[in-house]
């Protein structure tokens, strides 16, 4: 009797355990998914697929996964720029810290980007993993609490001393550092005459100007060369210093959509915006390479282009335009790592960057040079040339100013500064590999299907025979930890929603 009772009770207990274990396991998984500690780490080391970090893609830009000789470690190399990976988010987090272990011999800039909210698919917030130009700077260097300070002449012993006096200093630059200092031109006076730029530019471009006690006043002359089939609309957008869009206007095609059509008649676009606050404004022209800007007239004193110019006053385009301003062009630039390319034999030429020479001897090929002196003058004998890099350009020193001094997107030589503060620090070296870490605020992240997307980019990789091996990617997600009451409430809400209780 006692034995039968014991086995009956054991049977009942077993049934309870069998029923309860999956429920307990499910509740535990839900508990883990809420990340009550507020801290979550994922690692992808290429040895096997990760449940949280995707493989890098597109696959055709990566080599095969390889095993490191004599070890149990694996690596995979980037052979074409850029590549991407995604990270699964079980909950909403406030920050993501990404550590990348890699090898880089020759690429001057290696960067990691987080896809952010914005216009277009290429809205990425990039931060440097490695900047070889900055790493090679022979200035005094201090690093403390993930803040770095370079000084041309050592004046401050600590970063705290520098920050205490920074507002009174001139020639200060900030590179990937949240700098509250606003760019103001204390002695600025509006121009007393109209500025006319009679240089032809192809495709998209953007530039800065400065406004104080004056109307923003620009007149553009556009023409469509009609060398390709299809519509060629374009748009003009204007942003204030905080990045807020204050103006946008789209302009339709000229009505001729065949590649056999002649170049369109000139179209003049006039923009006048009164009552603007003092400060920097960015004017952005979004256009295909079919659209040529033939002239810019403005009442503003400054006209400083950003990252890119496509010079086209060349006989290559004389079939479409009979009034091109042929002859050499001189460009004032603060780009330290300059890129050049041409699409036509008319653009093959030798360029001068101060006393340096670059021979553009092939079409459809990117040429790069690190300028020995920044700022510099670029002398272009024949035009029909793309000039690009991370920095600023102007057609004369009189039209140039640098509103990015407190928000440098790249370090390109010394750019006339004596102090540089940054959240960037050089990568660590360990056993033939390099390692560096960047942190992103996720407030403005573009999150799709509960995933973050990151990009790894070496902008000059596609113009070289280099590859960049990767050995490990570690992602640390952070948010505020949950209190016991918050955790219970989230679990209850989850089950109510899941099972419609």
Image: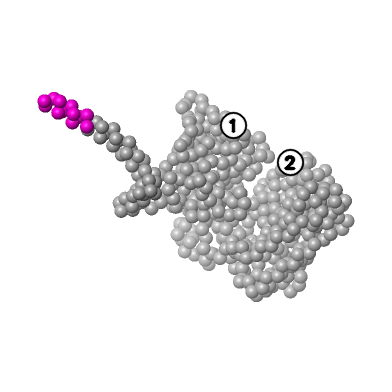
Say if the magenta span includes residue 5.
yes
Highlighted range, magenta: 1-12
Specify the quadrant that holds the N terminus: top left
Residue 477 vs residue 370: left or right? left
Q: Picture quarter containing residue 63?
A: top right
Q: Which residue is mark 1?
A: 63
Mark 1 or 2: the one toward you: 1
Residue for point 59% across, 63% down: 244
Residue 142 in picture, x, y percent from top left: 48, 52
Residue 79 vs residue 297: left or right? left
Query: Element type at marker 1?
Result: loop
Residue 105: tell me if it is visible: no
Residue 493 vs residue 122: left or right? left
Residue 246: tell me if it is visible: yes
Q: Which residue is mark 2?
A: 365
Closer-to-camera residue (89/200): 89
Q: Which mark is residue 5?
A: none
Residue 257 in picture, x, y percent from top left: 80, 51
**Would you say the magenta stretch is mainly helix, strand or loop?**
helix
């Amino acid at each position: 009797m006692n034995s039968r009772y014991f086995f009956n009770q054991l049977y009942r207990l077993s049934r309870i355990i069998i029923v309860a274990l999956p429920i307990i396991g499910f509740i535990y998984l839900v508990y883990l998914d809420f990340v009550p500690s507020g801290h979550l780490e994922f690692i992808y080391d290429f040895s096997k697929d990760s449940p949280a970090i995707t493989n890098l893609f597109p696959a055709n830009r990566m080599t095969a996964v390889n095993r490191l000789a004599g070890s149990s470690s694996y690596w995979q190399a980037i052979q074409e720029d850029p590549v991407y990976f995604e990270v699964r988010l079980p909950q909403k987090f406030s920050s993501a810290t990404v550590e990348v272990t890699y090898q880089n011999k020759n690429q001057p800039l290696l960067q990691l980007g987080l896809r952010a909210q914005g216009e277009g698919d290429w809205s990425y917030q990039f931060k440097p993993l490695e900047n070889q130009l900055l790493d090679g700077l022979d200035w005094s260097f201090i690093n403390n609490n993930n803040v770095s300070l370079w000084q041309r002449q050592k004046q401050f012993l600590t970063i705290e001393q520098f920050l205490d006096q920074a507002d009174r200093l001139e020639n200060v630059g900030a590179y990937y550092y949240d700098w509250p200092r606003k760019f103001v031109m204390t002695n600025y006076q509006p121009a007393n005459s109209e500025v006319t730029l009679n240089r032809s530019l192809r495709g998209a471009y953007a530039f800065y100007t400065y406004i104080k006690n004056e109307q923003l006043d620009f007149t553009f002359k556009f023409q469509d060369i009609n060398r390709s089939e299809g519509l060629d609309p374009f748009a003009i957008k204007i942003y204030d210093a905080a990045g807020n869009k204050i103006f946008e206007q789209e302009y339709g095609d000229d009505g001729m959509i065949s590649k056999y059509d002649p170049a369109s008649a000139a179209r003049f676009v006039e923009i006048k915006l009164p009552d603007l606050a003092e400060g920097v404004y960015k004017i952005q022209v979004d256009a295909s390479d079919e659209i040529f800007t033939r002239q810019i007239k403005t009442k503003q004193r400054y006209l400083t282009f950003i990252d890119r110019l496509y010079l086209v006053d060349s006989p290559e385009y004389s079939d479409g335009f009979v009034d091109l301003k042929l002859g050499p062009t001189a460009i004032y630039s603060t780009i330290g790592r300059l890129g050049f390319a041409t699409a036509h034999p008319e653009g093959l030429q030798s360029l001068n960057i101060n006393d340096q020479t670059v021979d553009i001897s092939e079409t459809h090929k990117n040429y790069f040079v690190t300028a020995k002196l920044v700022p510099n003058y670029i002398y272009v004998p024949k035009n029909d040339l793309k000039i690009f890099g991370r920095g600023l350009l102007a057609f004369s020193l009189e039209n140039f100013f640098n509103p990015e001094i407190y928000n440098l997107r790249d370090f390109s030589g010394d750019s006339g500064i004596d102090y540089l503060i940054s959240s960037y620090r050089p990568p660590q070296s360990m056993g033939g590999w390099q390692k560096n870490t960047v942190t992103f605020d996720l407030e403005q992240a573009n999150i799709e299907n509960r995933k973050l997307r990151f990009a790894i980019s070496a902008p000059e990789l596609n113009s070289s025979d280099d590859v960049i091996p990767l050995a490990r990617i570690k992602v640390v997600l952070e948010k505020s930890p949950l209190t016991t009451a918050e955790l219970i409430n989230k679990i209850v809400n989850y089950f109510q929603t899941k099972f419609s209780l």
